[in-house]
Amino acid sequence: MDPDPARTPDLEPGGGVAPGSTPPEAGQVSGLSAPEPRTSRHFPPTGVAAVVVVVVLVAVFVIAAVGILLTL
């Protein structure tokens, strides 16, 4: 339920507030609370293995496609 505007302290007729009736601006706080630890590896071994597997599969398909085209 909204408060009654007629009973709200420091509220002017237009709905604004008088200067000085609001708290001062707070200082900005940004950034992390603690430094983040450095990562030991940028790319995990499982990622490297996945890339190698994909490259090998693509090579096998390319070799098979070339072999099929040469037999035609």
Image: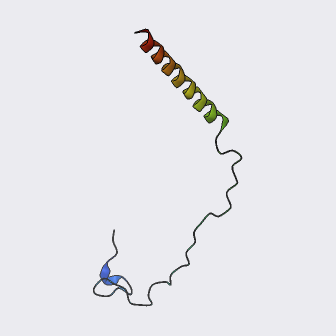
- Quadrant where the C terminus is found in the figure: top left
**Total label count?**
0
Percent position (x, y) of residue 20?
A: 45, 90
Q: Residue at x 33, y 71 (%)?
A: 2
Q: Is residue 67 left or right of residue 14?
A: right
Q: Residue at x 57, y 24 (%)?
A: 56
Residue furthest top as drawn: 71
Q: Residue at x 60, y 66 (%)?
A: 31
Q: Is residue 30 left or right of residue 15?
A: right
Between 18 and 30, the one lying in front of the other is 30
Residue furthest bottom as drawn: 19
Between 27 and 19, the one lying in front of the other is 27
Q: Is residue 1 left or right of residue 26?
A: left
Relative to 44, is 49 above or below? above
Between 31 and 21, the one lying in front of the other is 31
Relative to 61, is 50 above or below? below
Percent position (x, y) of residue 22?
A: 45, 84
Relative to 42, is 64 above or below? above
Quadrant in the rendering for residue 10: bottom left
